[in-house]
Each structure stands twice: as C-alpha cells, then as structure tokens.
Amino acid sequence: FGHVSGAHINPAVSVAMAISRNISFMRAALFVTAQCGGSIAGAALLYGVTDEKKMPSTLIQITMPSQTPWQRFGMEVVLAFVIVYTYFVTMDSHRKWLTGSGISIGAAYLSCNLVSMPALNPARVLGPSFVMNKWDSHWVFWFGPISGGIAAGLIYEFIFNPRRHVNGNKDSIDGDSSSIHSDEDTYDELEKPRSTYNTLRSVQPGGAIYGPVGGNLTPGSPT
C-alpha cells in the first residue's frame, strides 16, 4: 500500500506527516478515520469469532495492570518516536541504500514490541477498547504515540532531512547573488564620479563621426 497512501497504518505516523507538512491535514484526517474504522471492524470480527476468555493479550494491552498510566505514557512516547523516525528515514528517497522500507519498519516494530508489549498505535487499541468497552486510561494510547510521532517527524524534517540541507544551501547561494540592494548601495552609486564616454554623434558634412560628448569642438575640427 505504500504507493497508494504511504502505508501509514498508524495515526501517529499520519499526524507526524501532517505536522511536518509532508501531507495535508485533510488527508491525514481521512487516513486516521480509515485506520480507526478498520481497527474497530477487525476487533469486532475477532471478538465475534473468538471467546473473550481467550483474548488475554488484548486485555492486558488495553488495561495495563502492571504499569501506571504515566509510566506507560513515557514508554509509548519513546518507542513511538523510534517507529515514526524509522518510517521517515526509510521513506526518504535519499536514503534508499539503507534497506527496504518494509523490512526496516517491521524490524522497528518487532524490536519495540519486545519492550512490555507497547501499543505504538492508537488505532490498534481503539478497536478492542470500543468492542469490549474498556476505556481505562485510554488517553495514554493516543497522546503517547502521537506525541512521540510528532517529535520524531519534526526532528527528522528540520534537522536530519538531507533535502532541507540541499535547499538551504541553494537559498544561501541565491541570497549572495540577490539583485536587491540596500539604501547604502544606492548612495554609494550616486557618490561615484561620472565617467566620460565616447558616444555616437550625428554625421555632418565634412565633420567628424566620433567625439566626446562634453567637448567644445566645432563640426569638421579634428579629434
């Protein structure tokens, strides 16, 4: 789906892309709506074909029995930062030499999921929470990943983005050769002495063709 929508699949990625001005806010809103709708539909389908007692991992992930909300919030911020930053790096055409984007992003998710089963995706938690009506500290799963994603997007876009450095150098070169002059430049031009130039004069019978403009020569006199 990368060539269709960018394959965000995560509201944290979509919001970060909008904040960093890579996509419009309208497009990001549509992406987030689709992600949340798909999450609810998938959770409802899974809930309908599976016994609730056989879904312990989902319940643990949305209830956080072993962590306080602020501990979970901090973990979501840090790990979502890693995920979104990886997305920005792998989707940059200047860094295609790293590896395939799917492999890099998948490895980032796998590595982060080894740390206390983080959500990393607000839509991932919204579906089970909506279907099972479990809303305890649900704000953590939205503000945590989105905060980390925004931080990752801004840091990459304004610090590590190679395209921005190229454009910045080009702007500085253009600034050096700018045609806009200051008032001091204008005054300097006025203070310069005027030069005397030889200009083309009208041809008169028996007269010289060329001569100084400010001269007092009469027609026909030698120059």
Image: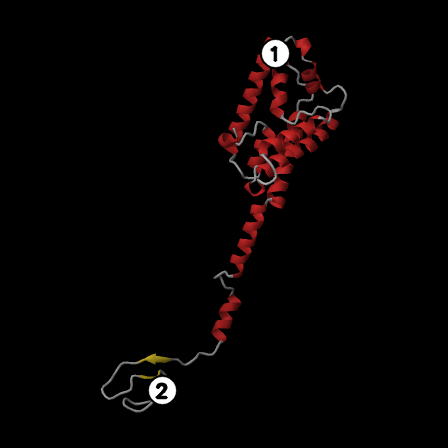
> Percent from the top left, x then y, of residue 41?
55, 16
For residue 10, which quarter of the picture?
top right
Amino acid under disc 2: Gly
Towards the viewer: 185 or 157: 157
Which quarter shows the C terminus?
A: bottom left
Location of residue 90 by image quarter? top right
212 sits to left or right of 21: left
How packed mark 1 is, by other alpha carbons closer than 10 Å (few <14, some 14-19, many 20 or more), is some
Q: Position of residue 26 (x, y in %)?
A: 50, 32
Q: Which mark is residue 47?
A: 1
Residue at (34, 79) in percent of width and height: 199
Question: Residue 49: percent from the left, percent from the top?
Answer: 59, 9
Which residue is pictured at 63% across the width and 26% down the height?
A: 121
Rendered residue at 59%/31% (across/down): 102
Pointer 2: what residue? 215
Nearer to us in this view, 88 or 190: 88
The amino acid type, in three-letter code, at marker 1 is Tyr
* For residue 222, side relative to residue 20 (left or right): left
Relative to 130, say whether 28 is above or below. Answer: below
- Residue 37, quarter of the rendered image: top right
What color scheme is it? secondary structure
